[in-house]
Amino acid sequence: MPDTSTASLHWDYRDGRVAAVAAAVVYSLWVLEVVLPGGGAAQGALAEPDSPFGEFLDSTHRMASILVIVAAALGLSLGTRRTRRWLLVSWWSMAAFGVISLVTSLMPGACRVSTDVACAAESLAEGVHGATVAQALLSVAAVAAALVSVVALAVNRWSADDPAWLFVAVMAALQAVAAVAVLILAGILYWASGDGDPGVPLGLVQRAHLVTVALWLLTAGIVPGPWKRTHDGRAAATAH
């Protein structure tokens, strides 16, 4: 956060934690589909790209991507130096997820959750306007980056003897199951040339994966171990 006592901009470790938690919240705003126009579980959040809800999802997903990049950047610069190797893998993978999410959100296509692999695969198979192979591949890369980040964070917390490692490991396991499920679904939809229904609805599997991604970002923000306090460039106490 800006330091008003000096002329320079000073970032605190808490800014990174807030950015990660905020990204988790913003990334979860798809749940508002049940109350906003153009949403609705029966219709599917992605069925009407030009609906107010579709445009809302576009904006929130882009905002979440930027928050993820900020959190990763502050983690890399202010994160604890203890057991640094695995933590570096986690931060860089988080940064990759944020950058890929941002890039795909700027690409044309029907997928309002731009890293939705199943949507990208189905759109490509059905020849939906704006669908590209690049977006499908980037979506797979985003899923992989998020999974690598949470797994690396779990290993980091375990190697640091942090009691929170088990909690992080559970988050990693849940995301792994959801990631495998959504990749299998994407493969089925692609090789079957779509599901035969118009539009690309946000299904239960995709929703489950979005939940696990949000939980990973929330975990990265609330677990204190990966962060350290700094003041005027000097390291203070490091939480385990």
Image (cartoon, rainbow, N blue to C red):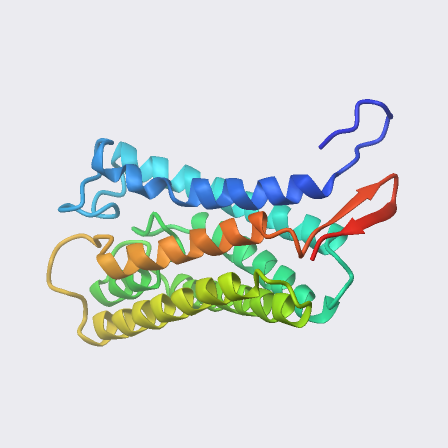
In this rendering, position of residue 118 left or right of residue 62:
left
> Residue 124 falls in which quadrant of the image?
bottom left
Furthest residue in direction left, as rendered: 196
- Residue 206 location in percent, x, y? 30, 58
Residue extending farthest to the top is 4
Picture residue at 11% right of the left edge, 58% below the top: 197
Q: Is residue 132 left or right of residue 146?
A: left
Residue appearing at x 41%, y 65% in the figure: 175
Residue 66 in view, yes or no: no
Task: Note whether residue 195 is visible.
Answer: yes
Q: In this figure, what is the number of numbered marks?
A: 0
- In the picture shown, does residue 139 fall above or below 155? above
Give the image location of residue 25, x and y in percent: 44, 41
Q: Position of residue 225 (x, y in %)?
A: 66, 56
Identify whether 148 is placed above or below 29. Answer: below
Q: Is residue 33 left or right of residue 211?
A: left
- The percent coordinates of residue 42 (x first, y second) are 13, 46
| Residue at x 37% of width, y 54% of height | 210
Which residue sits at x=25%, y=72%? Answer: 190
Image quadrant holding the C terminus, namely bottom right
Quadrant of the image containing the N terminus: top right
